[in-house]
Image (cartoon, grey):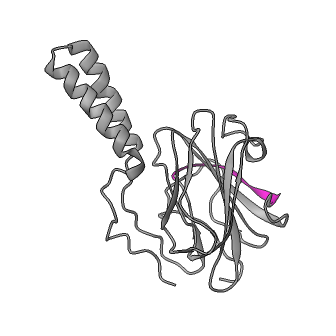
Amino acid sequence: MADQDVRHYPHPVIAREGWAFVGLSLFLALAATIVGLESVALLLWIIAIFVIQFFRDPARTPPLGEGLITSPADGRVVVVEKAQDPITGADSLKISVFMNVFNVHSNRSPIAGRVTEVRYFPGAFLNAAVDKASEQNERNAIIIEDSQGRRLTCIQIAGLVARRILCYVKTGDTLLRGARYGFIRFGSRVDIYCPIGTQALVSVGDKVSAHSTALARWSDA
């Protein structure tokens, strides 16, 4: 299964999830400018610029190499450890990426494969950077199986401000690596659980980019 060809971008560089927000913010800023409300207009233009940068969704180039598991999100690595997969119960390598409000928020599939399960969990809205957010916050999990039968779990986690998890895939869907499968509005976290033996290629504190950064490598690659 080939990787997604990111040269042929499927929509403009502003994520479709933000079109309404961008349109409204620009309309209000322009309206305030036209009627001469200078101080209000300045504030609204600043807000509009923030909204545009938040919903940016640039094309990405994948890393070179065999058996790579790429980042599902932009942000900073906050966890690299052995942990139990909360969906399958299997011992796993857990890698967590925290997204702040200045990161791109489109979520991309870390591997090419078929979605074998999608599961949603209601929950709290704690700071997504803390460990207990993985268990207590609202979250949405998908399990992806590649053509060689290798599986991983990818979990979108809501945060203190991020209160809208969008997931566009269902069980049985086939994803290319780097395909956009969801979005989390206004900052949050994504956890990946890979089989024990998977080699981590990042460390806590590293900055990563969705689809462009390899988080790990399959053990048999």
Asked where in the image residue 59 lies, by quadrant, the reply is bottom left
Q: Position of residue 68 (x, y in %)?
A: 58, 74
90 shown above or below 47? below
State the extent of the magenta-drawn residues as a range: 74-84
Give the left or right position of residue 184, taking residue 85 as reference.
left
Vertical placement of 79 versus 45: above or below? below
Compare residues 68 and 44 and report the one nearer the observer. 44
Decide whether the magenta segment is chiefly helix, strand or loop: strand
* Residue 10 location (% of width, % of height): 34, 65
Residue 23 at what x, y percent from top left? 29, 39
Q: Is residue 28 rendered magenta in the image?
A: no
Q: Which one is nearer the viewer's eye here, 157 or 198?
A: 157
- Residue 184: where, in percent of width, then height? 54, 47
Q: Quadrant of the C terminus?
A: bottom right
Which residue corresponds to the image point at 48% horizontal and 76% vertical from the top-left? 64
Where residue 196 sits, quadrant-wise, is: bottom right
Q: How many marks?
A: 0
Q: Say above or below: 214 vs 53.
A: below
144 lies left or right of 41: right
Q: Residue 72 occupies which quadrant of the picture?
A: bottom right
Seen from the viewer's position, the closer of residues 181 and 82 is 181
Does residue 117 lie above or below 27 as drawn? below
Question: Residue at point 56% right, 61% down?
Answer: 71
Residue that appears at 57% across and 73% down: 173
Q: In the image, is residue 77 part of the stretch drawn in magenta?
A: yes
